[in-house]
Image (spheres, helix red, strand yellow):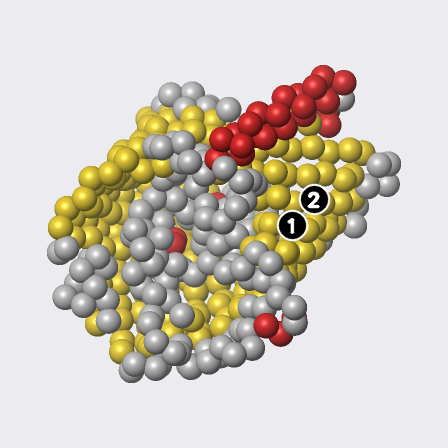
Amino acid sequence: MHLSHRTTLVAALVAGLFTVSAAEAADFSMRGAFDVGLTYSHTKAGDTLRMDPGQYVGSEITLMGEENLGAATVGFNLTLGYNTDDGTMDNTGDRLWNHESQVYLKGDWGQLGAGRISSFATGLGTQSWYVKYDAFEAGYVDAALQSTQHSTWSRFSNSVYYTTPSFAGLRAGVFYSLTGASEDKEKTHFQDNERYWNVALNWGRADEKLSFFLSAEGVERANGSTLKDGWIVKGAARWDLDFMKLMGGFSHSEHQDEYAFASWAANAIYQASGNLSGGIRGDAAYVGAQFPVAERVQLNFQYQYLDGHNTDTDEDFKRHVVAAGLYKYFSQRTMLYTIASWAKGSGALDEDIDPDSSATTFQIGVPHFF
């Protein structure tokens, strides 16, 4: 579908849904974000300066609706992501609702949903339980979790999930995708698909002063893959001390095809080449803090460490990331952010091997929510 046709379709859908909402105002709502900024990065390969869309939250438009059926409520979320710097859609593939498209049913027994969704272990979407455990809300080049963690910015088509109701602040969830993050359509035979699963626990005190997150996730490789099934264990905690919010976490991964999620660079520069068997294993940890320093002003800090081994090439690697940021809130809807981060890789991530793995990065931008 040509982009102009997509734009016309979006306009028609929004207009039509607003007409419906006039008759049933409680059943439909629309929200979104506009996020744009500048990124300067210095590496051994050279300096870059670019306008980046969606550095903080990702620019998107979400249509949401619910209907009360009495014993349960049925609802939907449709989210379109777009690039503020050039007006294009921000995802590959012929998708209109590229960030999320799910339908769900919820009641006293919990919530059941299906569609294109992010899992509990990611920092995206309505089903994310992980994002609040990162001082930078899982955003920014190198400042946030994606530079040492896996699946932080992943979305999964053909997915189904279930979450329990809260029991004394504790919730559990189960998530399964028939095609994982790499494909949109199921192949003829189920075993030829690469599948993804995630189980998670999230607990928080009623006053939200203390909470924790535990998760296991994995990839079931498709027939013909030489790489063993991969898995990841994650844990995180958050503690509100009034004068600051302290947070941290860890992850252990096995049989991966990349060193980490690697969305801090233009390409997946951690991506391992060749036929893998045992793949890459890694351990990562981070600590972060958020400090309110004045009215509507907040300082953020984070340190990350990544350590692992490529079992197929017998190469070790390490990476350190230090980041600091300042948020200025002009209102509940508009803010200014400035972020500076420094990263240093060694071993397989040494700058002589991968010139982008060690970098000094500065970002400034403004998101507006509507």
Residue at the spot 36% in from the left edge and 53% down from the top edge: 263
Crowding near the residue tagged with mark 2, few <14, some 14–19, many ≥20 C-alpha atoms within 10 Å: many
Residue at the image point whose x is 55% and y is 73% from the top: 222
What residue is drawn where x is 57% and y is 25%? 11
Q: Look at the picture and state if 231 lies above or below 168.
A: below
Q: Nearer the viewer, residue 112 or 6?
A: 6
Q: Position of residue 63 (x, y in %)?
A: 61, 32
Residue furthest toward the top? Answer: 22
User: What is the distance, in whole Å, between disc 2 and disc 1 at their CAs?
Assistant: 7 Å
**Contact, mark 2 vs mark 1 (Cβ under 8 Å):** yes
Q: Is residue 122 left or right of residue 313?
A: right
Disc 1, SS? strand
Say what amino acid the circle numbered 1 marks.
Gly
Q: Can residue 348 be spotted in the picture?
A: yes
List the residue tagged with mark 1: 115
Report crowding for label 1: few under 14, some 14 to 19, many 20 or more residues within 10 A (C-alpha): many
Viewed as shown, does residue 257 lie left or right of 165?
left
Q: Position of residue 326 (x, y in %)?
A: 29, 34
Outermost residue, right side = 70
Viewed as shown, does residue 40 lie left or right of 287? left
* Residue 353 in which image quadrant: bottom left
Quadrant of the rendered structure where residue 14 is?
A: top right
- Asked whether 259 or 191 is in front, the reply is 191
User: What is the number of the mark on residue 129?
Assistant: none
